[in-house]
Image: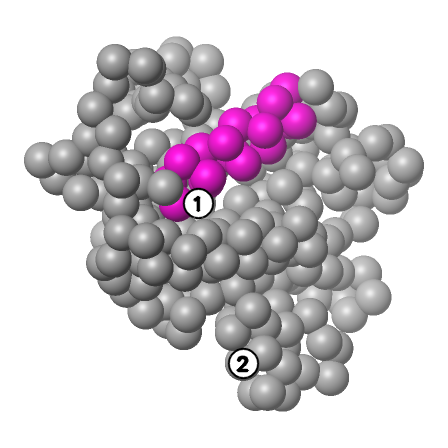
Amino acid sequence: IYDLSDACDPYAIPSQPRDECCKLFEIIKTSCVDCISIVGGDLFVAPVAPFPDDDALYGDVFGNRLTQHPAGGGATSAGAPRGLQLDVERMFIEKTPVLPHSLDELNLTRNSVVSGIFRVALASFLECARSSIFSSLGYRQMKVDAIFVRYLMPHFVKDEFGTPDANACTCLFNTIDDIVLMAGQRCVDPEVVGDDEYYDAEKDEIVTPFAIVQQFLLTGGNNVGGDSAGDILMKRISFS
């Protein structure tokens, strides 16, 4: 998936999130239904929020590390964090093991089960990134995938303060950030790392990974698009 086949084409850009990301949410959705049939509770956390139209709001929705936007809007920082800045940030990032310790207290709730499935999937994703070499297209595809997963995750998982799942969603967000960071470190074209402006040579315009995800959610990956195509996609991957 992330080989060097496109290394000679710096303008290659992804068209949409990979289907594996959609399949992940299909599994999550089915697991939610199975869980509440056994333990009860809510089917999901909250309706899927509208995709932000203003890029100044990306930091609030997707986090500072994924967007390089300060929370609450403002100017974009100069590229992805590196060196000492990155080491300091990592010191304060909440981490969680993929599998709980045998002596840890477990919650048999929908939120706990679903967050566990996400942890395993994202840990595998991270290991894939660690063992891959990324071309410019591979890195950009990973960024689109990460934004897509991050956008839908709060629909299924939340931080439940005062429980073993107090940082369930926060830790998943941090893992997504680590995946993109690792992809950047393994990318053969450092100039594309942290650059969210992709030149679409076919359309002669600048697009961003956020715009690619937003368009995918609206059209369902169908170039013709239409409200029905987007609705079909959302019914496939969410309860909204």
Q: Closer to the N terminus: mark 2 or mark 1? A: 1
Label 1 neighbour load within 10 Å: few <14, some 14-19, many 20+: many
Q: CA distance from mark 2 to mark 1?
A: 27 Å
For residue 49, side relative to residue 6 (left or right): left
In this rendering, the count of numbered labels is 2
* Residue 88 location, quadrant: top left
Which image quarter holds the C terminus?
bottom left
Q: What's drawn in magenta, residue-wise?
A: 114-130
Tag 2 secondary structure: helix
> In the image, 12: left or right of 115?
right
Q: Name the kind of residue labelled 1 in the image.
A: Thr
Residue 207, position in %: x, y?
Answer: 63, 61
What's the mark number on residue 67?
A: 1
Which residue is label 2 attached to?
A: 231
44 magenta-colored: no
Q: Which mark is residue 216?
A: none
Indicate the position of residue 189 as horizontal and vertical percent values.
73, 29
In the figure, 43 relative to 141: above or below?
Answer: below
